[in-house]
Image (tube, grey):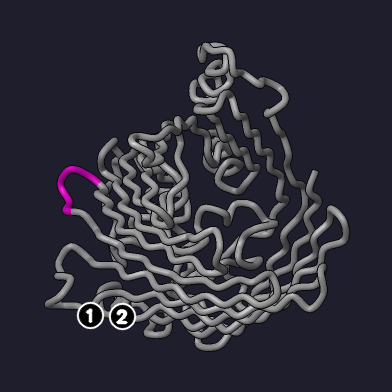
Amino acid sequence: MNKLLWALLLIPTLVMGDDHRWLDDFTVNGFIGYRYIWSSNNTDLKQSYPELGLVVDWDISDNFHTFTQLNLNPNAVDHGIEHALVYGFVDYSNTIKEVPFRISLGKLRHQFGLHNDIIHNPLTRPGVIPPQAVTFNPVNATLTSGYGAKLEVWLGDWVVGYTIDKFVTVDEKVESQFWTGFDFVEIDPKFGNHMIYTLNWEPDDLDWKLRSSMTHIKFNDDLPSIDIGAIGIEYDNDDWSASIETVILKPDDMEWFEDFNDLRFGVSATVGKMVTDQWHVYVNYNTYLNSALSARAKVDEEIDKWRDFNVGTSYDIEDVQLRLEVHKISGGRALNPKDWDAKTKSWWIVGTSVTYQF
């Protein structure tokens, strides 16, 4: 992490030209707050912890830009300070025959569903606890970022992208159990073992957007890849919002078409309303299907399921945001494997957060 941070800081001195704007386009902002999570069965779906973050954004020139986000999070506290670097990359943008493109290098943001690249900012994430049927907290580090390169090309309102990198793992035992559903496998991240193909439609003059991706993950050289397809569509006119997204996971022993009905599915749907300029309310339902965990891991059948109906609200008072969220859950598939023996037939989660932005 230290080498990457130093590189990001030194890049401006290496980019020569007359169009440097230096500190005029150097912005620093951040947030500080606390998120508290209560669960009726004492499971650790999402930890209660202070939320501190710093975002440094530098438009070095018309073509070069850097983005760095640092968060104090449980991964950094429990598993190594290098995990405080959520993202840190430099990108170069230009056009070829009036076709815009961008190349990014560093610790990159991964697209996964509609909102995965913004869930590490408490002011933009979709809820106190993002829908676990499509975000999977136990493997959040892998889904969040990786060290490598990304290419994006704009074709009108469409954006085509390709990412190749070395994915991030935090707790090898927990993550391998979650991915395989029953067993420990060695996780050995290497460059090229993680690739993402993206296709997005995000018109500037409409209130709609569509995001889709195909992710390939290879845990070590001896295992075949796991493929994950994701697609989501969202409508937001600054008064009402609605979205639906789905994640489809294909284990290595299945085929996309022949075994389609047996693939793993996660679905999330949300409707939101701005009651006033400061007050937002929303309703979400997310579920995960066909995990087949109980047959493979011989755990309780309820752990194999995930159905989460939740309602939430947020209120902004100048630079402070208050949030409250209540979840009624059946099942435990999104739980950390250490909690697979918990009572999960019917349980509750209440999440609250307070965040100050500076």
Residue furthest left as drawn: 258
Residue 306 sits in quarter: bottom left
Instruction: Pick out the residue farthest to the bottom.
Output: 346
Q: Observer-nearest residue: 278 or 88? A: 278
Q: CA distance from mark 1 to mark 2?
A: 6 Å
Q: Image point 28% across, 37% down: which residue?
A: 190
> Which residue type does callout 1 highlight?
Asp
**Magenta part of the chain:** 220-224
* Identity of the residue drawn at 53% across and 18% down: 11
Task: Looking at the picture, tell me which residue is in the foreground, 244 or 179.
Answer: 244
* Residue underneath mark 2: 290
- Indicate yes or no whether the magenta region holds residue 223: yes
Quadrant location of residue 258? bottom left
Q: Is residue 340 visible?
A: no
Total numbered circles:
2
Residue 109 sits above or below residue 22 on the image: below
Is 243 placed left or right of 50 in the picture?
A: left
Identify the residue under disc 1: 262
Q: Is residue 50 visible?
A: yes
List x then y, in percent, for residue 335.
Answer: 48, 69
